[in-house]
Image (cartoon, rainbow, N blue to C red):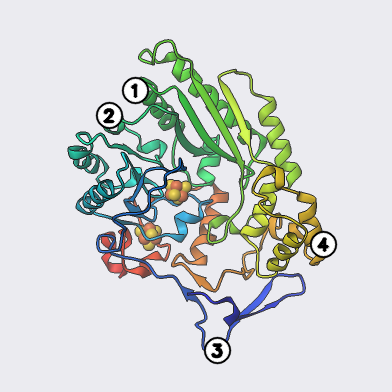
Amino acid sequence: MYVPSLYHVEYNEDGTVKRYTPKDGAPATVKKRVVLDMDSAYYPDSFPVPMIEVVHSRIAEEVLRGCIRGCRFCQAGFLYRPFREKSIDTIDVQCRALCASTGYDEISLSSLSTSDYSKLNELIDRLHQWTEKDKVSLSLPSLRVDGFSPELMERINSVRKSGLTFAPEAGSQRMRNVINKNVTEEELLHTVNVAFTEGWTRIKLYFMIGLPTETMEDVLAILDRGKKVVYTFSENKEKPRGKAVEVALSAAAFVPKPFTPFQWFGQDTMEALREKQRELTGHVRSRRVSVSYHGAKTSFLEAVFARGDRRLCAVMEKAMELGLHFDGWDDQFDFDKWMQAFDACGLDPAFYATRPRGKDEIFPWDHLDYGVTKDFLWKEWERAHQGFTTPNCREKCANCGASCYKGGLCVEKRPDMV
Ligand code: SF4
Ligand code: SF4
């Protein structure tokens, strides 16, 4: 448990952190705890079922924790290491109990990356032994582009044919190497082709703009991916008859996060982001392709708070005094009032959002230990600039530090590291 008041902070003249000093016998770093054995960990066998329509109106069965990938922008991917799975037996028992107690007819097999479950086809076959009979459908909320096989499609085909969503995250291969999203264009096009053959016609693709080292060419490559998906549909002889393809491209502004290799990156300025957004929307030439994006102002504020420190508490309090409530809703959002709050507290938001950090800067979160070392993250930051990818944990351990938890793939594959 982390108690902020047990850590005294001193700042340098330039506003960066000078040191954190633990008080009253608190440890120098606070180390997270992890559940190593997912089979014996508590999981609820019932929960209240609302009488009104809600989002996520279904059973969520967590099948694994952590992620074997190391996408360099992804905080969850690093925070929740090491990778741990539940056994098929455990998932089966828990799903049966939850269906019986809640009456839901849909189970979402949930995790950071469910297609990385090592025995996914076997798991779905096991669940089908009773879910088909009981008319319970299965859904996989987080599919990777390269984890989408015809066999898997067949197994989840009983599920409704609403849109399919994938996250290639970046348009060009160069950019995908920088962020370590190890999917290729061939894999993406193969996947959508399989989806079209199986009857899907609506595809949503998530991308980010404002990534480290990005050029306008990389940004416009997002549109090329959209066009190629449309072309793939037109060339597919087994696509659904009489239906048109719809490709929705979503381009979120990248927000650098702590505990990731991109924690040193200065976010694109709002003007740079707006220019990229203008270019992107200005070049859409097909009625089959649409582009959406988030406002640059909200992304800027997100970046401030994502890598903020305790001085920002005063800003939040001031913002509240100025009447900012529920401003996750666009109609309640008032950027000028936020700037007023920063001014009143004598803080410059750009210091937190758009300032690139140096290698040796002490971060406000350095005394929190999630296993993955800062040295490893820095090496990944350098590899990103060199355009080198890092293999996933199943292919090769990259020695990130999470093996200190003596669990997950790290230890199964590398007993010498325990
Ligand atoms: S696949 Fe990548 S983006 Fe998805 S959870 Fe894993 S590390 Fe994060
Ligand atoms: S120690 Fe190796 S196998 Fe374990 S999470 Fe880190 S990189 Fe992956």
Q: Nearer the viewer, residue 212 or 350?
A: 350
Q: What amino acid does circle 4 point to?
A: Asp
- Location of mark 4 (residue): 343
Give whichever of discs 2 and 1 has the lower sequence position.
2
Residue count near mark 3 (Cα–Cα under 10 Å), binned few <14, some 14–19, many ≥20 = few
Rendered residue at 25%/34% (across/down): 135
- Location of mark 2 (residue): 154
Query: For the C terminus, which image quadrant?
Result: bottom left
- Location of mark 3 (residue): 24
Above or below, 293 against 80 in this view is above
Q: Farthest residue toward the bottom? A: 24
Residue count near mark 2 (Cα–Cα under 10 Å), binned few <14, some 14–19, many ≥20 = few
Cβ atoms at labels 2 and 3 below 8 Å apart: no
Residue count near mark 4 (Cα–Cα under 10 Å), binned few <14, some 14–19, many ≥20 = some
Residue count near mark 1 (Cα–Cα under 10 Å), binned few <14, some 14–19, many ≥20 = some
Above or below, 272 against 86 in this view is above
